[in-house]
Amino acid sequence: ILALFALINIISFGLTIADKKKSIINQDKRIRESYLLFWAIAFGAAGVMIAMFLVRHKTLKWPFFFGVPLALIQNLLVLWLLYINFFV
């Protein structure tokens, strides 16, 4: 489970960095905000949050400023519940 969690966070980190690079060069085909938020909710919030603050991408947009930390809390709570119910 932790390996899958790490893989999803690596992918979400990479997607956020890729979108930042596309925004710098004004490329038309950017990654949708809803897609990045989906990855955050689907257990990739840590990767999105680290990338957000590492490269200062989407830090002023309220869905990311409030949504990604809430998704991180949701991610950690679900992992904790899985641990409590299946491994303890």
Image (spheres, rainbow, N blue to C red):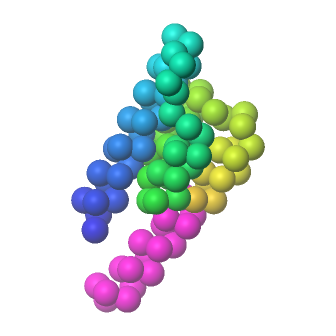
> Is residue 80 rendered magenta in the image?
yes
Q: Residue at x 56, y 13 (%)?
A: 26
The outermost residue toward the top is: 25
Q: Residue furthest left?
A: 3
Vertical order, 36 against 20 (above or below): below
Quick one: quadrant of the C terminus?
bottom left
Instruction: Decide which of 31, 1 is in the foreground and name it.
Output: 31
Q: Of residues 67 and 28, which is closer to you in this image?
A: 28
Is residue 24 something one can see in this rendering? no
Is residue 70 found left or right of 22 in the rendered image? right
Q: Residue at x 46, y 59 (%)?
A: 42
**Quadrant of the snapshot with the N terminus:** bottom left
Looking at this view, is 35 or 45 the one in front? 35
| Label tally | 0
Query: Is 33 left, or right, of 8 in this rendering?
Result: right
As displayed, is residue 74 above or below residue 58? below
Q: Is residue 70 left or right of residue 46?
A: right
Which region is colored magenta? 72-88
Q: Position of residue 50 (x, y in %)?
A: 49, 40
**Which residue is pictured at 52% across the width and 53% down the height?**
38
Instruction: Please provide percent x and percent y for residue 58.
Output: 63, 33
* Residue 51 locus on image (x, y percent): 49, 35
Is residue 36 a member of the stretch shown in magenta?
no
Height in image: 22 above or below 85? above
Q: Residue 71 at x, y = what percent?
A: 57, 59
Please, what is the dominant secondary structure of the magenta stretch? Answer: helix
- Vertically, is 54 above or below 36? above
